[in-house]
Image (cartoon, helix red, strand yellow):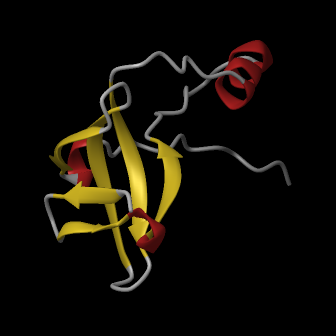
């Protein structure tokens, strides 16, 4: 059985978790080509990534830094460290 060694709740079976995706900051005030690149393309290079995870039994959301090459959890990330300001879009009347 594969275990995820979460710094917040300890070692738990990976089946208890949902991988939500890599933390990515969207481009603000970008043209269509830049947005298309952001939405449809990923780097997928092995190494340390910040990822969103959800633990179903506790209902806890968290962000981990995980080495995708070795599958080692490096640490828990404070959500304030990945927060970004949302662009202020004007909705046409």
Nearest the viewer among 3 and 8 is: 3
Q: In which quarter of the image is the N terminus?
A: bottom left
Corner quadrant of residue 58 = bottom left
Residue 83 drawn above or below residue 49:
below
Q: Where is residue 82 in the image (x, y as percent from the top left)?
A: 31, 42
Please give the name of the residue rendered at 26% of the width and 53% of the height, measured from the top-left corner: 79
Q: Residue furthest right?
A: 93
Please give the name of the residue rendered at 38% of the width and 30% of the height, measured from the top-left corner: 68
Apparent side of residue 9 relative to residue 40 in the rendered image (left or right)? left
Please give the name of the residue rendered at 34% of the width and 21% of the height, measured from the top-left corner: 47
Q: Residue furthest front?
A: 1
How many numbered circles does the render carry? 0
Residue 49 drawn above or below residue 42:
below
Apparent side of residue 65 relative to residue 54 in the rendered image (left or right)? left
Nearest the viewer among 77 and 85 is: 77
Nearest the viewer among 47 and 79 is: 47
Residue 21 drawn above or below residue 57:
above
Please give the name of the residue rendered at 86% of the width and 54% of the height, measured from the top-left corner: 93
Q: Position of residue 70 (x, y in %)?
A: 30, 29
Q: Position of residue 27 (x, y in %)?
A: 55, 26
Apparent side of residue 92 relative to residue 7 in the rendered image (left or right)? right
Nearest the viewer among 50 and 13 is: 13
Residue 29 drawn above or below residue 53:
above
């Amino acid at each position: 059985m594969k275990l995820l060694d979460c710094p917040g709740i300890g070692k738990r079976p990976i089946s208890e978790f949902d991988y939500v995706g890599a933390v990515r900051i969207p481009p603000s005030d970008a043209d269509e080509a830049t947005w298309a690149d952001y939405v449809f393309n990923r780097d997928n290079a092995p190494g340390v990534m910040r990822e969103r995870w959800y633990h179903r039994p506790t209902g806890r959301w968290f962000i981990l830094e995980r080495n995708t090459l070795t599958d080692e959890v490096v640490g828990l990330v404070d959500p304030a460290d990945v927060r970004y300001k949302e662009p202020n879009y004007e909705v046409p009347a």
